[in-house]
Image (tube, rainbow, N blue to C red):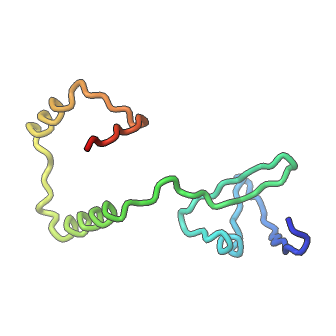
Amino acid sequence: MPKNAKLLEIPATITDRGQTTVPAAIRKMLALGKRDRVVFRGLADGTVVLAKQESAEKPDPVIGKFLAFLAKDMAAEPARIKPVSRDLLERGRKLVRGVTVDLDEALPDDEA
């Protein structure tokens, strides 16, 4: 840390359940919002660093808008919501029977 850097030090209490509140000044400094996650990093010298945990994936704006559209439509027209028929469910099961998918496997390159 540079010699002229200011250190922000705010005391906090650990509850009986091992919990504490992240002080408002720290939440603001880290741009933490509700439901955001943090990560604690313990360094070899005993220092603990608190940081905002960055999401590995950014939400897809198209899917978000589509899901919002569905939610609005379902709320406006609940009578139109119908269960999936047994026939359609069985047809889907037959279509994927024996198919295995490895979600961690890299996608093949598209061929031109």
Q: Residue furthest front?
A: 112
In-image side of 30 versus 100 (left or right) = right
Q: Nearer the viewer, residue 98 or 75?
A: 98
Return the x and y of residue 33 as percentages of the image width and height.
56, 69
The furthest residue to the right: 3
Tell me where residue 56 appears, x and y as whole percent.
51, 53
Name the spot of residue 112 as percent of width and height, x first.
25, 44
Q: Where residue 77 sits: x, y (%)?
A: 15, 67
Q: For residue 75, what is the image quadrant?
A: bottom left
Residue occupying the point 68% across, 73% down: 29
Quadrant where the N terminus lies?
bottom right
Q: Is residue 109 above or below residue 59?
A: above
The part of the image, by quadrant, that contains residue 49 is bottom right
Q: With respect to residue 26, does 84 lie above or below?
A: above
Displayed quadrant of residue 32: bottom right
Report the number of discs. Answer: 0
Considering depth in this image, is 105 or 110 the residue closer to the camera? 110
108 on left or right of 71: right
Q: Taking 19 as reference, is 93 left or right?
A: left
Furthest residue toward top? 98
Looking at the image, which residue is at 41% across and 34% down?
105
Q: Nearer the viewer, residue 107 or 68?
A: 107
Q: Residue at x 11, y 34 (%)?
A: 91
Is 97 placed above or below 49 here? above
